[in-house]
Amino acid sequence: MSILEKTGIFATGFLLIAVLASELVGLVANLIFAPLFGMRVTTISFFGLEFTISDNKWTKTFHKLSPIIQHDVRFDSRKPVESFSDKKADMLQLVTVIAKFTVAVLICLLFRDIFTKTGAYNMLDLLKVSFATGMVFHALFSLGIYLYTNLVLMKRLGGYINTLIKRLRQGESFASLDMKPVEELGYKNPTKTEQLLYYQIYMGYLAAVGNYDGMCEPSHQAMNFLIDREYFVQDTGSYYWLIFFFSEIEPNIPLTDMLLKRLGDVIKSDRDANAKRVLAYYFFNIRRDFISAQQMVDAGLQALNSNSGLATERELERQLLNELNERLQLINKPVSPSLLSHS
């Protein structure tokens, strides 16, 4: 084999097969163990297919084809809020890391004869070695993320975000959070990921207090972060708020259509109130389709009865849906005959 062929085979095993296998192990571990820690897998995405659970029903959607496996684990909203704790979330993350290490060790044991083999490797041998070492590497990488999250990130903006989420889970409203622009928080060099997570909560706060002018700067920053990168499941909340912003606050047809195209069927099949609210404002402001906007408002208000999500989130969604509903009622309100007689 040439050097180029060896490099290609090693990269396939180490970067492609091992990455997919490692993510699959993480997914299976979370599907099995998340319920034990008061959490559950809410979204699974692979090769362009996305499965999302809402009202205890899985729905299938399709978005841009992607050769990666992703999944999202969240607090199980069917259970009492007080049953959730950061310690449980940390333990689930640690269990996932242990599962990846366990599988990596088993694979190395399975291929142990290859590691002690003398002489040249054939293509299959090289693929096995690269796959096994890749599994060990990605397990170590997961451990690194776990340690970084708990020893470093919690002392940065990520820790403050975690505090905000905890306050919302405890029943505080968005309006009571008294949030500030990320630049005024005093955290040095926050990562783009941290800023996007903060953005999703900050936009909820700004909407709750009616500070729509304050949405401009963070929304443009978030758009700059996301415009040149592939859609990831974890960015869905940011996409929703950006579509809302570029529909309601700063109408922009090309940007809203681009964001919706990236989401594919994700937002259309999302039964939660926030998805219906985002689409309602899009139809109202961008498409001027008041019939579809009213349908989305009605669907969003109906979705609030499912008790999906936090009570504080439902409170905010109800506020935003009712505000648009009032505007729609004015449009649909018949003109008084007395007014017509004076025209």
Image: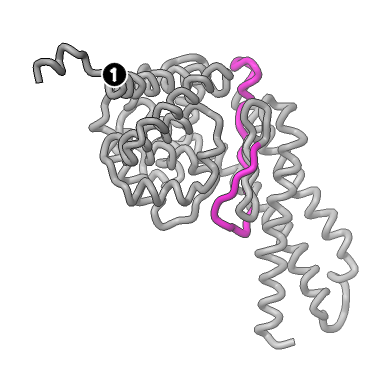
Confirm whether the magenta stretch covers residue 286. Answer: no
The verdict on residue 64 being magenta is yes
Which stretch is magenta? 59-84
Q: Is residue 198 left or right of residue 131?
A: left
Residue 319, image x, y percentages: 38, 19
Residue 144, percent across and down? 61, 48
Q: Nearer the viewer, residue 176 or 295?
A: 295
Question: How many C-alpha atoms fall within 10 Å of the one at disc 1: few (<14), some, or many (≥20)?
Answer: few
Horizontally, residue 36 falls left or right of residue 330, namely right
State the residue at coordinates (67%, 35%): 58
Residue at the spot x=32%, y=46% of the render? 221
Tell me where residue 211 appears, x and y as whole percent.
26, 26
Is residue 156 in sight in this rendering? no
What colouring method underlies this structural image? one colour
Q: Which residue is mark 1?
A: 333
The furthest residue to the front: 341
Front position in the image: 205 or 325? 325
Quarter holding the C terminus? top left
Residue 171 lies, in percent from the top left, at: 49, 14
The N terminus - image quarter: bottom right
**How many marks are shown on the rendered structure?**
1
Q: Is residue 252 left or right of residue 144?
A: left
Residue at 58% x, 58% y is: 65
Q: Please identify the residue farthest to the bottom as the structure is shown.
A: 2
